[in-house]
Each structure stands twice: as C-alpha cells, then as structure tokens.
Image (tube, rainbow, N blue to C red):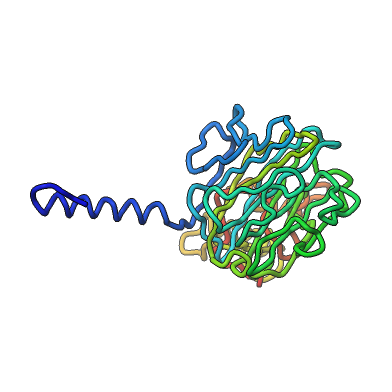
Amino acid sequence: MCIVTGSSRCSLVFILNLIISITMSSTVRADFDYLDFLDMTGLTLVGSAAQSGDRLRLTPALIGQVGAVYTSEQVLLSPGFDTTFTYEINPAAGGADGMVFIFQNESPTALYSNGGPLGYDGMTNSLALEIDTYINGIFNDPPVPHISLHGRPGTANSADEVTASIVSDTSSLNVGGLRTMRIAYGNGIIDIYLDDLTVPRMSAFIDIALYLNSDSAWIGFIGSTGGVTQVNDVLSWSFTNGGVTEFIRGDSNLDGSANLPDAIYILSALFVPGSSQVTCLDAADINDDGNFNLTDAIYMLSALFIPGSSPVPEPAGNCGVDPTDDSIDCETPICP
C-alpha cells in the first residue's frame, strides 16, 4: 500500500513496481559469449555450483554433490539457436556421475537429486542433454559412458534410458576430460556435436516447445556426484539465437556452387562501385577467419588453381553450418 501524501508519488511507486515485476519475469532473445567466467553477470548459481577462478565449477571433488547454473532470465529458443561450450570432467575416466546441459521451465533455481539422477530426474518441462560418465543399472544406462538427450512431454523428465531417452550416442569410450560440445537447433532438428563441430554426433527431429511447454526456457548446466567423485567444470559458453543457417562456403553469388565466378563476385563487391553486394558473408568468408576482405578472394583462387594450396574449409561442396563462432552471418542463404 502507498501511504504518502500526493497521488503523483503513489503513481511513481506503482509504475516502478510494475517495471520490476515485468523485468523479473521477462524472456529475452539473447546472444552471449562467456570466453571465461571471471564475470558471472547474467547467471544464477544453485546448489554446489560456484565460481572457481575463471571457471564455473558445478561440483567439487566431494561425494553427494549437485549444482546448477542457469541464465538469470528465460531465453527465447525459437526459431532456433546455436550454442557451444567447453567443459572439463576430472578425472577423465573412473569418476561419477556426470553433467547435463539443461533447458527447463520449472523454476529459475530448479535442482533435483545428486548421483545417478544427475540433478534433473523428476524435473518438469525440461529437456536434458546428459554427459553421463557412470553406468547406473537402475537407469538402464548402456554399458559405456555416453551422451543422451532426455525429455518426456507433459510429464516429469527422467534419467532412465528406456523411458525418456530421445537419442543416445555410445560411440565414445570416454566423454570426460577436456571437451567441446555444440548444440544447434533449427527447422525442427536438433544436432549435437562433440569435439568435431562440423559433423553431428547425433541428431533428432523434435519440437522443443513441446517438451518445455513454451518457446523459452532457463538454460544452463547441472553437475552431479554420488558415492564417487569428479570435478565438473565449464570453461566457456556461447549462445546465438535466431536459428541455424546453412550455406556453402565459397558460394558467394548464391548459385549453388563454388567456383571462379564466386571469386570474381567477391572482387567486384569489394572494389567495383555499383556491383551487387555479398548477402551471405559466411559463404564469402572463404578462409573462415570471421572477416570478409581481399584475402578471401585470394584464398579462393589459390584453392581453385594452385596445386597444394589449402582447401576451402567446411562447409564446402555441400550445405552445412559454420563450425566457427564469429560475428558474421548469412542473411540470404541458398540452402533449405
């Protein structure tokens, strides 16, 4: 209640409270890039999670730990997104239980049991990508460490491989150590990469809003230990909203192929006034250095005509996504 003289001050208090309430429940279309975690602005820590130097430490080397870090605001996930993070699980093998990249709409501090449940088993409106280092028979885990995407629309999520796994990969003998993971979502397809950021380790057709009961969510990480310890760290994290754009590197004129006319197109766009401009900068960034300039035309000509020259980086020859996190994009892609 506003008990002050003068209606103007009451009105001001009301407006300020309204702004605060809107801000606290807002959803943002977010692009961010944490090269490290010396600055934790925009993040919420839960449970055992803590800042450790320039890292996010989800669990220390103690038994029975569970910790999470989420974006402080819900992030818009439609029409798509591309996120990459570097993590380190120590020891690389023989520890437990693992970590999770999580999308969830339950609460800004949602966190469940340590150990095999990996901190998310029982969480509603969630989609969880497990990096599971321990074989738990109670959750029907495969006989090797694995990565696995879990979700159950309309009901609580589960760490059980039989009842909740959407897609799983068991091709790695070890998912611990220092690794880089990428998750790209667009056009109803989620692609998950591990170390090789050009070829998906696993993919699935999903409607992410169906699992989250929303187009937005708090996103972040959960780490868990049980009767065996391991340190679960996140070293860097970037996120780009707006969908996953596919293109052919070298196809600067967007005719579906990469050849001499593309190099000429680049030179014309750079140096001939009135020429058509490049609208897919990713395609024209031939050397994949995150810039568009003369060196791209030179790189293209060398790759085409000088034996022994470096080949055009991926995606070359076929449609694909940019494996490099940079500031340029493709406004008018030719790829579907």
The answer to whether residue 262 of the structure is visible from this angle is no
Residue drawn at 28 percent across, 52 percent down: 17
The quarter holding residue 46 reads top right
Q: Using the image, determine if residue 122 lies above or below residue 334.
A: above
Q: Is residue 64 or residue 78 the one in the foreground? A: 64
Instruction: Using residue 219 as the reference point, say whether residue 317 is left or right of it.
Output: right
Residue 204 spot, x, y in % from top left? 74, 66
Residue 175 spot, x, y in % from top left? 81, 44
Residue drawn at 65 percent across, 66 percent down: 155
Q: Is residue 278 or residue 53 the one in the foreground? A: 53
Outermost residue toward the top in this view: 53
The quarter holding residue 167 reads bottom right
Q: Is residue 166 or residue 275 the one in the foreground? A: 166
Q: Using the image, determine if residue 66 lies above or below residue 103.
A: above
Residue 211 spot, x, y in % from top left? 63, 66
Residue drawn at 59 percent across, 33 percent down: 50
Outermost residue toward the left in this view: 6
Residue 282 spot, x, y in % from top left? 61, 57
Instruction: Using residue 95 as the reference point, say whether residue 216 is left or right of it.
Output: left
Q: In which quarter of the image is the C terminus?
A: bottom right
